[in-house]
Each structure stands twice: as C-alpha cells, then as structure tokens.
Image (tube, rainbow, N blue to C red):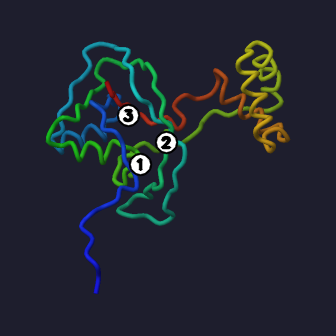
Amino acid sequence: EITYQDYFKASDSIQIPKAYVLGKQWHNVIKRLDLNKISYTELKQDSSILVESYQIDDYSTYTSPYEGHYPHYNTSVNVTNITKEFKAGDIVIPVNQPGLRYIIETLEPSAVDSFFNWNFFDTILQQKEGFSPYVFEDTALEMLNNDTILKSEFENKKIEDLDFKNNWYLQLKWLFKHSKHYEEAYMQYPIYRITY
C-alpha cells in the first residue's frame, strides 16, 4: 500500500518577473513564441533598460541524443542587475498573459524544458577568444598596476584560494576574464528579466 501525499515540495523556485527582453536575432525562439500565441511588443527605438541578467554558471549535457538534441540539465546561473542597451526591434514579453506557464518554462534557463536546455542558445557556450600567456603577461601586469580595485580583488583571491595562488595560469586566466578582451557573450544568457 502506498500512502497518498496531497502536497508538493518545491525543489527550486524563482520570482516571476514583470517581463522578459529578448534580442530580435533569436528568430527560432521568436517563431516558437508566435506559434504558442505569446504576446510581445517590439522596442520602437534603442533603449537602456535596468534588467536582471543571468550568467550561466554550470550545466551538464546528456551524452545520448533525445528528440534530435543533446539537452542540457542541472543548469545553474548567477544573477546580476545591470543597465543594458537594447536595440529597436528587440522584443519585450510581458508575463501577465494566458501563456504565463509556457513563458516561464521556456525562458527560465534552469527550467527542464527551457530553450537553453533544448540547445537554442548553444552559441553562448562557445568561447572563441582566448589568450596566449606569453603575450598577455605584460597586459596583465599593466592591468594590476593601473587598477587598485582589481589588484585588491586579485590579492584577496590569492589569499582565499591556495590553488589559485600557486597556479600562474589560473591567475592569468582570471585577469583575462577581467580584461576588456574577454568575450561578453560567453556564458551570457541572452534573455533578460524586467522585475520592477
């Protein structure tokens, strides 16, 4: 005999935003929003908007295909508030509409059936630019000499992380990630949240 439990316990949750913002270049996603009768408006002009931004922190990928994809799972993100420049034609998707559940389950990257987990945004997972240690060393030293805040963060990281302290390559990699040469699109989830 099985005891009937008439409740659920959430293993994960989010605060539902007022709207999402998506760049107009993501045609395959916009097409699916249209097919599911999701309402949105296009920005009439370039606009600066205060948004929540997701950076993909970690994820796993199945090694066998499912429905023609190698879906991701166990997706986790870091959240920051930023003022982002959006272009005319980018779309704003309000959540206060009949398709709320579809919107949340496809636009939140950690949701099982999100567009991220179904490989729609795999281009953000490809880092195209790197650094050559022998070329970047001088730039890294210049960065530390010219930015006291960065130098302080760097020194604190060496105190807190013994592996980092003892690994010159990890140190250069950290500095590269904090340089103007680092790709902003790498691991940057391309859907933003308006929460106010």
Residue type, label 3: Ile
Kindly indicate the quadrant of the structure image that contains residue 15: top left
**Quadrant of the image containing the C terminus:** top left
Q: Is residue 42 left or right of residue 80?
A: left
Residue type, label 1: Ser
Q: Nearer the N terminus, badge 2 or badge 1?
A: 2
Circle 3 SS class: strand
Q: Are marks 3 and 2 in contact (CB under 8 Å)?
A: no
Q: Which residue sits at x=34%, y=35%?
A: 26
Instruction: Tell me, for residue 188, which label it has, or none.
Output: none
Closer to us: mark 3 or mark 1?
1
Q: Which residue sits at x=85%, y=41%?
A: 166
**Quadrant of the image containing the N terminus:** bottom left
**With respect to residue 17, does 77 lie above or below?**
below
Q: Are marks 2 and 1 in contact (CB under 8 Å)?
A: yes
Q: Quick one: 100 or 126, which is closer to the camera?
A: 100
**With respect to residue 77, does 69 lie above or below?**
below
Report the residue marked by disc 1.
Answer: 110
Q: Residue 21, image x and y in percent? A: 32, 29
Q: Residue 40, image x and y in percent? A: 21, 30
Q: Are marks 3 and 1 in contact (CB under 8 Å)?
A: no
Q: Nearer the N terminus, badge 3 or badge 1?
A: 1
Circle 1 SS class: loop
Q: Which residue sits at x=41%, y=34%?
A: 190
Report the residue marked by disc 2.
Answer: 77
Residue type, label 2: Val
Q: Residue 146, image x and y in percent? A: 76, 12
Report the residue marked by disc 3.
Answer: 191
**Between marks 2 and 1, how big is the CA–CA gap?**
8 Å
Q: Which residue sits at x=27%, y=37%?
A: 30
